[in-house]
Amino acid sequence: MADAIQNDGETTVSNPTPSWFDISTPDSARARDFYQKMFGWTVTALDDTYALVGTENAPPAGGIGQAGPESPYVGIVVYFPVADVDVALARAVELGGTVVMKPQSTGDERIAAFKDLDGNTVGVTSP
Protein backbone atom coordinates (compact mmCIF):
# COMPACT_ATOMS: atom_id res chain seq x y z
CA MET A 1 0.00 0.00 0.00
CA ALA A 2 1.14 3.58 -0.61
CA ASP A 3 2.53 5.83 2.11
CA ALA A 4 0.00 7.61 4.31
CA ILE A 5 0.03 11.40 4.54
CA GLN A 6 -1.74 13.90 6.76
CA ASN A 7 -4.37 16.06 5.02
CA ASP A 8 -6.49 18.47 7.07
CA GLY A 9 -5.92 16.27 10.12
CA GLU A 10 -7.08 13.11 8.39
CA THR A 11 -4.87 10.24 7.28
CA THR A 12 -5.12 9.51 3.57
CA VAL A 13 -3.03 7.59 1.06
CA SER A 14 -0.69 9.50 -1.19
CA ASN A 15 -0.94 7.11 -4.15
CA PRO A 16 -4.12 7.52 -6.27
CA THR A 17 -3.62 4.17 -8.02
CA PRO A 18 -6.75 2.01 -7.77
CA SER A 19 -6.41 -1.22 -5.82
CA TRP A 20 -9.53 -2.99 -7.15
CA PHE A 21 -12.44 -2.56 -9.52
CA ASP A 22 -15.88 -4.05 -9.33
CA ILE A 23 -18.44 -4.30 -12.12
CA SER A 24 -21.92 -4.82 -10.70
CA THR A 25 -24.55 -5.76 -13.26
CA PRO A 26 -28.05 -7.26 -13.51
CA ASP A 27 -26.60 -9.97 -15.81
CA SER A 28 -23.18 -11.04 -14.56
CA ALA A 29 -22.87 -13.99 -16.99
CA ARG A 30 -23.38 -11.65 -19.95
CA ALA A 31 -20.91 -9.13 -18.50
CA ARG A 32 -18.28 -11.82 -17.86
CA ASP A 33 -18.56 -12.97 -21.47
CA PHE A 34 -18.40 -9.40 -22.80
CA TYR A 35 -15.28 -8.42 -20.84
CA GLN A 36 -13.50 -11.69 -21.58
CA LYS A 37 -14.03 -11.07 -25.29
CA MET A 38 -13.39 -7.32 -25.12
CA PHE A 39 -10.12 -7.37 -23.17
CA GLY A 40 -9.06 -11.02 -23.17
CA TRP A 41 -9.38 -11.11 -19.38
CA THR A 42 -9.10 -14.32 -17.44
CA VAL A 43 -12.39 -14.52 -15.53
CA THR A 44 -12.79 -17.13 -12.81
CA ALA A 45 -16.34 -17.61 -11.55
CA LEU A 46 -16.51 -18.20 -7.80
CA ASP A 47 -20.23 -19.01 -8.07
CA ASP A 48 -23.22 -17.91 -10.17
CA THR A 49 -23.06 -14.38 -8.77
CA TYR A 50 -19.39 -13.33 -8.65
CA ALA A 51 -16.21 -13.81 -10.68
CA LEU A 52 -12.64 -12.66 -10.20
CA VAL A 53 -10.82 -10.90 -13.03
CA GLY A 54 -7.10 -11.29 -13.51
CA THR A 55 -4.49 -13.03 -15.57
CA GLU A 56 -3.03 -16.49 -15.31
CA ASN A 57 0.18 -15.09 -13.80
CA ALA A 58 -1.11 -12.36 -11.48
CA PRO A 59 -3.54 -12.04 -8.58
CA PRO A 60 -7.06 -10.82 -9.35
CA ALA A 61 -7.41 -7.10 -10.04
CA GLY A 62 -11.18 -6.89 -9.86
CA GLY A 63 -14.48 -8.66 -10.00
CA ILE A 64 -17.76 -8.91 -11.89
CA GLY A 65 -20.83 -9.47 -9.76
CA GLN A 66 -24.56 -9.95 -9.98
CA ALA A 67 -26.49 -6.85 -8.87
CA GLY A 68 -29.66 -7.76 -7.05
CA PRO A 69 -32.38 -5.61 -5.50
CA GLU A 70 -30.25 -4.97 -2.39
CA SER A 71 -27.04 -4.10 -4.28
CA PRO A 72 -25.49 -0.82 -3.15
CA TYR A 73 -24.67 0.14 -6.74
CA VAL A 74 -24.83 -0.93 -10.39
CA GLY A 75 -21.99 -0.14 -12.78
CA ILE A 76 -18.26 0.01 -12.37
CA VAL A 77 -16.70 1.15 -9.12
CA VAL A 78 -13.01 1.76 -8.64
CA TYR A 79 -11.62 1.13 -5.16
CA PHE A 80 -8.74 3.19 -3.81
CA PRO A 81 -6.44 2.16 -0.96
CA VAL A 82 -6.70 4.19 2.25
CA ALA A 83 -5.14 3.80 5.67
CA ASP A 84 -8.51 3.35 7.38
CA VAL A 85 -11.87 2.77 5.67
CA ASP A 86 -13.88 4.26 8.55
CA VAL A 87 -11.82 7.46 8.61
CA ALA A 88 -11.97 7.81 4.82
CA LEU A 89 -15.74 7.26 4.75
CA ALA A 90 -16.27 9.83 7.49
CA ARG A 91 -14.10 12.27 5.53
CA ALA A 92 -16.15 11.70 2.37
CA VAL A 93 -19.36 12.47 4.28
CA GLU A 94 -17.76 15.55 5.87
CA LEU A 95 -16.92 16.80 2.36
CA GLY A 96 -20.49 16.27 1.11
CA GLY A 97 -20.39 12.66 -0.09
CA THR A 98 -23.04 10.05 0.68
CA VAL A 99 -22.42 6.52 1.99
CA VAL A 100 -23.79 3.82 -0.33
CA MET A 101 -22.05 0.80 1.22
CA LYS A 102 -21.09 0.76 4.90
CA PRO A 103 -17.70 -0.70 5.85
CA GLN A 104 -17.57 -4.48 5.65
CA SER A 105 -14.93 -7.17 5.80
CA THR A 106 -13.92 -9.18 2.74
CA GLY A 107 -11.52 -11.41 4.63
CA ASP A 108 -8.14 -9.71 4.32
CA GLU A 109 -9.52 -6.20 3.81
CA ARG A 110 -12.31 -3.83 4.71
CA ILE A 111 -14.23 -2.05 1.98
CA ALA A 112 -16.85 0.69 1.73
CA ALA A 113 -18.30 2.91 -0.99
CA PHE A 114 -19.66 6.44 -1.26
CA LYS A 115 -21.10 8.78 -3.87
CA ASP A 116 -19.08 11.91 -4.53
CA LEU A 117 -20.53 15.37 -5.17
CA ASP A 118 -21.34 14.46 -8.80
CA GLY A 119 -22.98 11.13 -7.99
CA ASN A 120 -20.01 8.93 -8.94
CA THR A 121 -19.69 5.82 -6.78
CA VAL A 122 -16.17 5.45 -5.37
CA GLY A 123 -14.84 2.61 -3.24
CA VAL A 124 -12.20 2.60 -0.52
CA THR A 125 -10.27 -0.34 0.86
CA SER A 126 -7.89 -0.82 3.79
CA PRO A 127 -6.18 -3.65 5.60
Image (cartoon, rainbow, N blue to C red):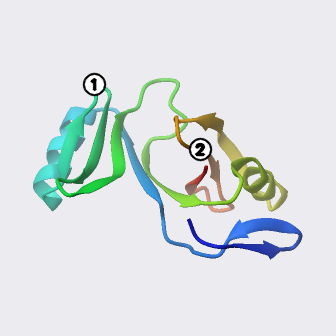
Q: Position of residue 90 (x, y in %)?
A: 80, 51
At label 1, the amino acid type is Asp
Q: Which residue carries the number 2 mark?
A: 111
- Seen at 35% across and 36% down, the residue is 65
As drawn, 74 above or below 1:
above
Crowding at dot 2, Cα within 10 Å, few <14 / some 14-19 / many 20+, comes out as many
**Distance in Å between CA atoms under marks 1 and 2:** 21 Å
> What is the secondary structure assignment of the residue under circle 1?
loop
At label 2, the amino acid type is Ile
Residue at the outermost right position: 9
Circle 1/circle 2 CB separation < 8 Å: no
Q: Position of residue 66 (x, y in %)?
A: 35, 31
**Quarter holding residue 43:** top left
Crowding at dot 1, Cα within 10 Å, few <14 / some 14-19 / many 20+, comes out as few
> What is the secondary structure assignment of the residue under circle 2?
strand
Q: Nearer the viewer, residue 37 or 11?
A: 11
- Seen at 73% across and 56% down, the residue is 88
Q: Nearer the viewer, residue 103 or 106?
A: 106
**Quarter holding residue 14:** bottom right
Q: Which residue carries the number 1 mark?
A: 47
